[in-house]
Image (cartoon, rainbow, N blue to C red):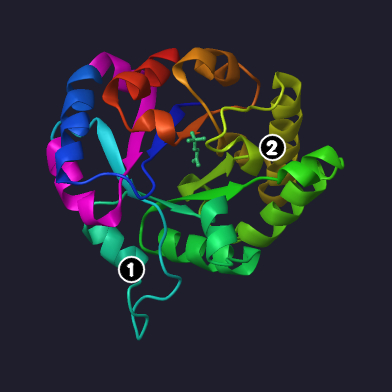
């Protein structure tokens, strides 16, 4: 399966940061791009200029969130259609920072994923357990419930990506043991196969949470890890490219 290496800039980056995309665009040669899909999700204000900064089309641009509705009285929100029009080919939904800080439920995330797919984007649906849930042995159950609640069952699976991001690994420099990542990704794959049948073998399952140049090859070598969702290390072209090269 073609890997996806996705950068999530979160609320970082201004026009000056586009130079990193210009640099990355030079590094991601046709040869590299043949091997894996590369994506950067900058703040929504940078979608259009980010797309122009990578004119070769080897780096896809995506958004970090969308509203579930197409339009209406939702001050400050952006619809999936608007984001796609601005250049987003992928839309991240249900990132743990949004689940925590904006109270997004599985049902909200599912509605956003449907909106993203409906607008023609690929939805990257994020799931992951907290530290307490991992320590009390609930991680598999928590993630299974999040997938059950957040993944649209009638969605076009070619427009579906899952990102497993343990909350306690995000931005902390901590990562799960390889066998824990393997166990979780296998469980997610089995659940997707139960939901969608054999074709679910084609759904990419990304790992996210402190993926860096020095652990990327190791993590990307685990079965059912089909790419990465990278925060901090995606902000600089050099470190993000090192992860792409590892894929
Ligand atoms: P991190 O973030 O790579 O900085 O841990 C990952 C994410 O939140 O998507």
Q: Secondary structure at mark 2?
A: helix
The residue under the point 25% across, 21% down is 28
Residue 68: percent from the left, percent from the top?
A: 46, 71
Is 124 displayed left or right of 145 in the figure? left
212 w.r.t. 19: above or below: above
Label 1 and label 2: CA atoms lie apart by: 31 Å
Mark 1 and mark 2 lie on one chain; the one further toward the N terminus is 1
Observer able to see residue 247:
no
Instruction: Give the main secondary structure of the magenta stretch.
Output: helix
Residue 73 in the image: above or below residue 43: below
Please state the extent of the stretch shown in magenta in the rendering: 29-54
Q: Quadrant of the C terminus?
A: top left
Could you say whether the residue bearing mark 1 is in a helix, strand or loop? loop
**199, above or below 123, in the image:** above
Residue 78: mark in rendering:
1
Image coordinates for residue 46, horizontal then vertical, percent:
21, 50
Q: Is residue 191 above or below residue 239?
A: below
């Amino acid at each position: 399966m073609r890997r996806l290496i996705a950068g999530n800039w979160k609320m970082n980056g201004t026009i000056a940061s586009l130079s990193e995309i210009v640099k990355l665009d030079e590094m991601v040669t046709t040869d590299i791009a043949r091997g894996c899909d590369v994506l950067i999700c900058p703040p929504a204000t940078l979608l259009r200029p980010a797309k122009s900064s990578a004119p070769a089309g080897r780096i896809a641009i995506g958004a970090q969130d969308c509203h579930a509705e197409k339009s209406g009285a939702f001050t400050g929100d952006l619809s999936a259609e608007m984001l796609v029009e601005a250049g987003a080919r992928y839309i991240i939904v249900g990132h743990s920072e949004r689940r925590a800080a904006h109270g997004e439920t599985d049902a909200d995330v599912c509605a956003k994923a449907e909106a993203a797919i409906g607008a023609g984007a690929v939805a990257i649906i994020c799931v992951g357990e907290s530290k307490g849930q991992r320590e009390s042995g609930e991680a598999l159950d928590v993630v299974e419930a999040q997938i059950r609640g957040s993944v649209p069952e009638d969605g076009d699976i070619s427009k579906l990506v899952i990102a497993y991001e343990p909350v306690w690994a995000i931005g902390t420099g901590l990562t799960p043991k390889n066998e824990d990542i393997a166990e979780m990704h296998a469980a997610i794959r089995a659940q997707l196969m139960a939901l969608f049948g054999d074709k679910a073998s084609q759904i990419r399952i990304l790992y996210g949470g402190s993926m860096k140049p020095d652990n990327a090859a190791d993590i990307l070598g685990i079965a059912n890890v089909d790419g990465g969702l990278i925060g901090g290390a995606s902000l600089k072209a050099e470190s993000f490219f090192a992860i792409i090269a590892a894929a």
